[in-house]
């Protein structure tokens, strides 16, 4: 009897704590949603900030973040996927492979602020890119690299070896096998991972602090050597060190909601895409 | 010919792949090189900024001072030479701004051409004087002594308790408060997050049915995807004022606020990693326990938890690692006072927050700039060690089981 | 009264009809072998008696399963953990816990609320002796169970099952993962254990069924084709399907 009661109590504790976790999440999302929803309008996302960033919109920050996401993915996606293919399909088990995997893991564990330091030292100062989209994108790209590599590896691992052997047995070369059989099958998972890493890159602040982000710059960039505003940094600025923190509170709620929506949409998109693409792969 | 071309093509692609494979290793290497070359160059440089010289009368036996002593003298905590190994004589401070108290503008000259001579005279005439002025005003036949200031060095850097990287005339680079602040905030964050996270992991893996799990799991993943600056914002707007109200504090930006925000942020890592570990318990092990008349809870705490303990500890360590490296959220809610933490209800400052807050103001190549890179090195080493530890734990598990 | 009885039991995994109206009785202190080709339902049937099938999502059970005349599925107040105390089980692969040899055997006692030290020690010793393992492990009871060989581990699992003094022991291919010498030891053990316990054993190995069991039940595609004295099943089966199976024509 005693042990039954213990079990009941334990399970109720677990249940309550789990729902507590969900409650925390929903209170964060709910709070930002409720406070932010009336701020968001067409003007908010298409206008320049005005009056010391207490009025107007966040257009340049949105454009800036889009530029950074595009720039970083342009670099990290091909390199990451190729690297994942190399690690999983080509590298032989042994010292080199273990070293590469260890380094990839370590890179994934390095705090984002250290990427910021590194990006500033290498791209901004040493290579003289200055505070620019180029420097920021490369820094963010390096940050996303281990994520993309890992996603690619996992996706390739999920492709059963029998498909590789089937293709090889028909006289396909290794490259043909990977290109025509393995990669198409792994693609849905790779794309899903890519979209999730976009969410991560779009939300990062620390790496762009000293490589690209502008405090207040009410114009659009003209090239890759321009500075831009970015959504997460903008939120940081107007909630902690803006010209008038109280007056820009509404702007902050709106910006936070935009960031949350961005992550939410990317999450849903990647799930939907995974379902759609894996169906398509199966049908072919 | 086409066959040859195809083989060449294959080799080419393989080369490109291999090159990409080395990018991460190369990046880690580059990070190490850049971080450490800037960071280590801090040591053996002088902590005296703006080319100042610190001088005393030539009868004064004090030949060198530590940065901390200089600060105490300027803060007037030390007012007598005997406290720093000199004679029993009170210290008279002099900076270049005080020059008008001693000499008129005409005496100095319109282009300061007579300044070195006057400064020499001044130092020579007042035995207890400690004078700070630019080294270019030290005249060729200067009669006083230029005091040597201890150079920046690793032991002092790690163990120093004063962080004033822009102090005049001598910067104070003691990172102990920052290290302690980082660990305080992170460890308390895990103390909050681990019980809750573990309970959720157990609930998802062993208690809830598949349907409930399929709802909770994606929500937890969403929690992981929210940008840290949003957590920081939420903490700043909601948690910080609550703490201020509940504990009746002058400011709500405290270590506690940081720990709570970081705890929430560490939850997804802890939950997913420990859930995986729990799920990896062999089915046979569970069934054996149930077949012996154990109920589900007994099976969980006597068999499943001990079996997955290494995975759970990996989750906790990984969570600490994430918390240590987290920047923005902490920067926004902990108040950033660089003092040794004594209580959770006090503002603290972490290493990442320090870098984020100060690097923008530090001039490139200066002592402050280098000190921040040295902080980056410390952070890098800590997280690297944590990564290795986790790696070690999970490898050990593979071999013994 | 029969020790174990099943009356027209149907079992479904979602849409799959795994047991189709099985009725069978087992007397006390006998060894009953369940044989049949893979997927015939014999393991599922075995797991009915300690309700191990309950752990799988989407399982639905109809009919009655009786232990000592009591319906183990529909008797109010009979909890699965209490049932499993009476019905021990030994699994296909040895599955000791990552604990010491001693703690493995003591586990069942501890989870059933027994904490008296001397009693536990005594019971551990008796069980290990019953499982013919005592002599081999008495000097290293504190060592990890993983240090034992596969055959020893399986006997440890048997000792573990015996420690809580069940009246029925279910064995799901207990020797399939073992070498011939360990298998022989386990078989010898089963033969001795039937003095105290009622044993049901699932086996793939026809010779094994012949050597250790009193009764044999042949399952095929979820149906109980034939159930009789082992002697009869092997020498004079009534159903042609049984005959084909025991003579090795399919399997």
Image (cartoon, coloured by chain):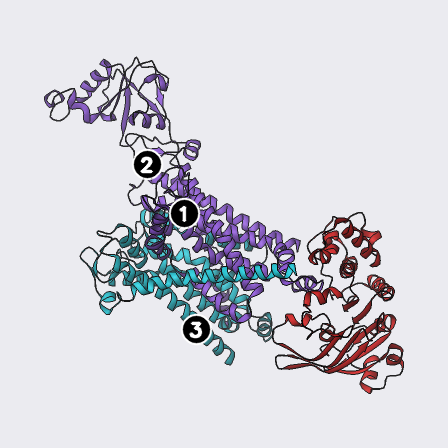
Chain colours: A cyan, B purple, C red
Please state the total of marks drawn on the protein image: 3
Residue B299, horizontal then vertical, whole percent: 64, 60
Name the image quarter holding residue B158.
top left
Say which of marks 1 and 3 sits in front. Answer: 1
**Residue at x-position 35% and y-position 28%:** B67
Q: Secondary structure at mark 3?
A: helix
Q: Share a chain, discs 2 and 1?
A: yes
Circle 3 crowding by C-alpha within 10 Å: few under 14, some 14–19, many from 20: some
Q: Position of residue B51 (x, y in %)?
A: 27, 30
Dividing the picture into quadrants, the one containing residue A166 is bottom right
Q: Which mark is residue B165?
A: 2
Vertically, is B81 above or below B26? above
- Crowding near the residue tagged with mark 2, few <14, some 14–19, many ≥20 C-alpha atoms within 10 Å: many
Is A163 situated left or right of B250 in this image?
right
Residue shown at the point (56%, 69%) measured from the top left: B209
Q: CA distance from mark 2 to mark 1?
A: 26 Å
Q: Is the residue B347 above or below the residue C91 in the image?
A: above
Q: Chain of mark 1?
A: B
Depth check, front residue: C196 or C55:
C196
- Same chain assignment for discs 2 and 3: no
What chain letter is assigned to the residue under label 3? A
Q: Quadrant of residue B74?
A: top left
Is residue C214 something that shows in the picture?
yes
Report which residue position mark 3 lands on: A273
> Badge 1 is on which residue?
B256
């Amino acid at each position: 009897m005693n042990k039954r009661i213990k079990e009941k109590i334990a399970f109720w504790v677990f249940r309550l704590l789990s729902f507590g976790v969900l409650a925390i999440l929903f209170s964060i999302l709910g709070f930002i949603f409720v406070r932010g929803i009336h701020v968001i309008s067409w003007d908010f996302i298409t206008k320049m900030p005005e009056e010391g960033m207490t009025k107007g919109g966040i257009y340049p920050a949105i454009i800036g973040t889009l530029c950074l996401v595009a720039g970083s993915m342009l670099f990290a996606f091909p390199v990451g996927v190729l690297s994942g293919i190399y690690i999983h399909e080509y590298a032989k088990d042994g010292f080199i492979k273990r070293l590469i995997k260890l380094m990839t893991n370590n890179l994934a564990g390095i705090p984002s602020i250290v990427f910021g330091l590194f990006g500033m030292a290498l791209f901004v100062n040493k290579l003289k890119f200055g505070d620019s989209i180029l420097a920021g994108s490369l820094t963010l790209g390096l940050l996303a690299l281990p994520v993309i590599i890992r996603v690619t590896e996992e996706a390739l691992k999920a492709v059963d070896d029998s498909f590789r052997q089937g293709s090889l047995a028909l006289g396909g070369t290794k490259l043909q096998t990977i290109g025509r059989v393995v990669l198409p099958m792994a693609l849905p998972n790779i794309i899903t991972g890519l979209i999730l890493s976009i969410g991560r890159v779009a939300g990062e602040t620390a790496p762009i602090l000293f490589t690209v982000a502008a405090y207040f710059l009410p114009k659009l960039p003209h090239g890759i050597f321009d500075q831009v505003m970015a959504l997460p940094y903008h939120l940081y600025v107007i909630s902690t060190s803006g010209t008038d923190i109280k007056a820009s509170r509404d702007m902050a709620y709106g910006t936070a909601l935009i960031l949350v929506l961005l992550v939410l949409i990317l999450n849903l998109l990647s799930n939907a895409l995974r379902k759609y693409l894996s169906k398509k792969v199966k049908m072919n | 010919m086409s066959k040859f071309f195809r083989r060449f093509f294959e080799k080419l692609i393989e080369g490109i792949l291999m090159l990409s494979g080395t990018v991460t290793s190369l990046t880690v290497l580059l990070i190490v090189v850049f971080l450490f070359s800037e960071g280590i160059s801090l040591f053996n440089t002088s902590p005296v900024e703006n080319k100042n010289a610190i001088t005393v009368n030539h009868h004064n036996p004090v030949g060198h001072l530590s940065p901390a002593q200089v600060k105490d003298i300027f803060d007037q905590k030390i007012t007598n030479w005997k406290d720093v190994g000199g004679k029993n004589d009170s210290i008279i401070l002099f900076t270049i701004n005080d020059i008008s108290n001693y000499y008129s503008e005409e005496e100095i000259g319109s282009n300061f051409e007579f300044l070195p001579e006057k400064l020499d005279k001044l130092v020579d005439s007042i035995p207890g004087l400690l004078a700070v002025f630019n080294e270019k005003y030290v005249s060729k036949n200067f009669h006083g002594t230029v005091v040597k200031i201890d150079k920046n060095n690793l032991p002092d850097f790690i163990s120093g308790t004063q962080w004033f990287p822009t102090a005049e005339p001598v910067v104070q680079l003691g990172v102990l408060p920052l290290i302690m602040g980082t660990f305080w905030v992170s460890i308390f964050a895990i103390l909050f997050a681990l019980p809750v996270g573990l309970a959720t992991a157990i609930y998802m893996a062993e208690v809830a049915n598949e349907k409930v799990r399929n709802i909770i799991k994606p929500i937890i993943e969403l929690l992981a995807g929210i940008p840290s600056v949003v957590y920081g914002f939420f903490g700043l707007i909601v948690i910080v004022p609550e703490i201020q109200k509940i504990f009746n504090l002058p400011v709500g930006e405290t270590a506690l606020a940081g720990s709570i925000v970081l705890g929430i942020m560490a939850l997804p890592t802890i939950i997913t990693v420990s859930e995986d570990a729990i799920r990896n318990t062999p089915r046979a092990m569970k069934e054996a326990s149930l077949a012996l008349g154990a109920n589900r809870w007994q099976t969980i705490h006597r068999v499943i938890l001990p079996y997955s303990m290494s995975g759970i500890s990996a989750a906790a360590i990984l969570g600490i690692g994430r918390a240590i490296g987290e920047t923005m959220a902490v920067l926004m809610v902990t108040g950033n006072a660089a003092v040794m933490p004594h209580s959770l209800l006090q503002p603290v400052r972490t290493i990442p927050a320090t870098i984020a807050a100060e690097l923008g103001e530090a001039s490139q190549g200066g002592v402050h700039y280098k000190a921040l890179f040295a902080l980056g090195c410390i952070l890098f080493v800590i997280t690297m060690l944590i990564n290795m530890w986790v790696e070690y734990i999970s490898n050990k598990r593979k071999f013994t089981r | 009264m029969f020790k174990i009885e099943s009356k027209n039991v149907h079992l479904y995994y979602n849409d799959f009809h795994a047991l189709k109206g099985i009725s069978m009785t087992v007397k006390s202190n006998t060894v009953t072998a369940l044989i049949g080709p893979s997927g015939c339902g014999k393991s599922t049937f075995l797991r009915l008696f300690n309700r191990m099938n309950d752990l799988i999502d989407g399982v639905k059970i109809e009919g009655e399963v009786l232990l000592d005349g009591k319906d183990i599925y529909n008797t109010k107040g009979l909890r699965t953990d209490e049932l499993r105390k009476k019905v021990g089980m030994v699994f296909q692969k040895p599955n000791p816990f990552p604990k010491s040899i001693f703690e493995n055997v003591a586990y069942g006692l501890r989870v059933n609320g027994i904490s008296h030290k001397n009693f536990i020690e005594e019971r551990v010793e008796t069980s290990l002796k019953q499982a013919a393992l005592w002599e081999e492990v008495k000097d290293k009871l504190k060592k990890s169970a993983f240090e034992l060989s596969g055959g020893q581990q399986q006997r440890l699992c048997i000792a573990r099952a015996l420690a809580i003094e069940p009246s029925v022991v279910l064995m799901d291919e207990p020797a399939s993962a073992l070498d011939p010498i360990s298998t022989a030891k386990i078989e010898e053990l089963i033969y001795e254990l039937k003095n105290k316990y009622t044993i049901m054993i699932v086996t793939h190995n026809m010779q094994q069924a012949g050597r250790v069991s009193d009764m044999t039940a042949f399952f095929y595609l979820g149906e109980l084709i034939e159930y009789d004295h082992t002697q009869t099943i092997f020498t004079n089966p009534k159903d042609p399907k049984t005959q084909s199976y025991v003579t090795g024509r399919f399997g």
